[in-house]
Image (cartoon, rainbow, N blue to C red):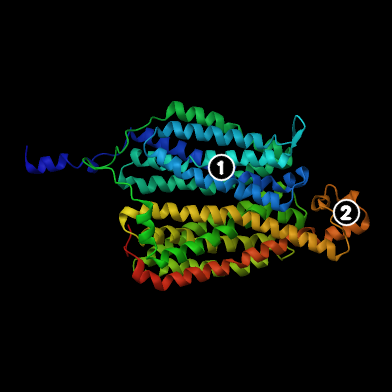
Amino acid sequence: MTDAAALSESKPENTNPGYGSKPYRTYVLSALTLIYVLNFVDLGLLSVVGPDLVPELGISDTQFGLLTGFGFALLYTIVGIPLARIADTGHRVWIMTICIALWSLMTALCGLATDVTVGSITIGAFWILLMCRVGVGIGEAGCTPPANSLIADYYAPQDRAQALGVYAMGVTLGGLFANLIGGWVTDAFDWRTAFLVLGLPGLLIALVFKLTVTEPPRGYTDPEGTKAKDDVPLSEALQELMKKPAFWLMTAGATIAAFCGYGISSFQSIFFVRSHGITAGEAAIWINTPVALAAAFGTFGTGWIASRLYKKYPGAIAWVPAIGLGISVPFYLFAFTTESLLWAGIGLAIAGFSKYGYLAAQYTIGQGVVTMRVRATATAILLFIVNLLGYGFGPLFIGAISDVFFVNGITELGVSVDDLARNQCHPKVIGLLDTNLQEACGAVYAQSLQSAILITASLYALCSLFFLLTWPRLKKDMVDRNPS
């Protein structure tokens, strides 16, 4: 055997297209993408049905913020770390099957939430719903880490980026279907039916996934002789990150952006139902769906612009999202103050399109400021902070501020909180109130939530500032100026 032939055989990555045949790889990628779509359908459904769920269960905006934010994000964030490590060594198809079934079942059970009496103790519907949301969070934490690992073995490095791009479509498609299907079912039937209709099919999908997807050999597409990377101690990763101010400035900006984004999206439907008198389904279809489409195009467009400019102007990866985040502020303020539903939708679409460039920036900067051995850990730390603080507290903040403004508003009008609860202002029941209480509702019912959202939207300016502060640090902190 010649030296050239030996060298050729020692580099199977040049000829190894990935595990299985091309049609089968396409099927597996389609299945994983469908599962990711389902992940975000079940994740976003609560915000879609919120306008009907909140008054029926008699929960406050603070409680709804807990359900959509911290109640889901806490265990989703914490459990995600050990599940990711298990996915590095365990049977990934089994892990995903169990997790899909768990979050689908818990989503369906959300539709059955009601007061439960055990002996002399009554557990309120809110607590039942919260436990179900925690279950959804635990299940969904086991989706992306093993899915990414499977894609890495099914697809060779040269095809992997495209495959991951297809998989990532689940984020926007999931939001679209949650609004289109969930909104329609809520109007046609009720919010409980929406949870059942969108939750139960996941049990069948989990079964089909397990029966039809094969666990590939781990590292199948790695070059021959590749050794597993040694685990990097967390202390070593933190020590390197502490020397990179750009990482922490960017993380602060990304966390506040997530705080604002998750908070506003959780209460967006509720606001438009309260302020414009439309139904939950109409808010989902007329407002949320076109806004989600605009955000999807903006995520790709601004990310593409920043990535292209980055190769020649490294600072662009920070100042492009900074500009976009700054531009979004006046459009958010306009959208939540105009009396025109059409113009509100247009304002939200422009804001959503312009702000999402920070997503590409957070990963580029997060991995670019550290050496290769620490990149995975740096990304994990970034996502832990962003998800726990941003996702967890954003909805809770808006809900709590909204409740404070409501109580203060009716108190200033001379109405006691014992005489008027927010849920009594809902259009379906407000007719049961006397004239004075109806007038109080008209003055503060939508306005209290509006004020909370406007305060939160204004914080996007702070996000812009943090990315601008990141800009001058990049020249010194970035390890790789031309990431592939």
Q: Quadrant of residue 29?
A: top left
Question: Disc 2, disc 1: CB below 8 Å?
Answer: no
Task: Report the amino acid beneath label 2.
Answer: Asp
Task: Report the amino acid beneath label 1.
Answer: Gly
- Give me the disc on residue 419: 2
The vertical placement of 401 against 72, above or below, is below
- Give me the disc on residue 277: none
Q: Residue furthest left?
A: 2
Dot 2 lies on which element?
Answer: loop
> Closer to the camera, 337 or 181?
337
Whether residue 341 is visible here, answered yes or no, is no
Q: CA distance from mark 2 to mark 1?
A: 37 Å
Q: Residues within 10 Å of mark 1 (few under 14, many from 20)?
A: many
The vertical placement of 325 against 265, above or below, is below
Residue 147 picture location, percent across and down: 43, 40
Whether residue 479 is visible here, answered yes or no, is yes
The vertical placement of 241 against 313, above or below, is above
User: Which residue: 53% across, 42% down?
Assistant: 37
Q: Quadrant of the C terminus?
A: bottom left
Q: Residues within 10 Å of mark 2 (few under 14, many from 20)?
A: few
Residue 262 picture location, percent across and down: 59, 55
User: Which residue: 90% across, 48% down?
Assistant: 432
User: Which residue: 13% across, 43% down?
Assistant: 7
Tag 1 residue: 137
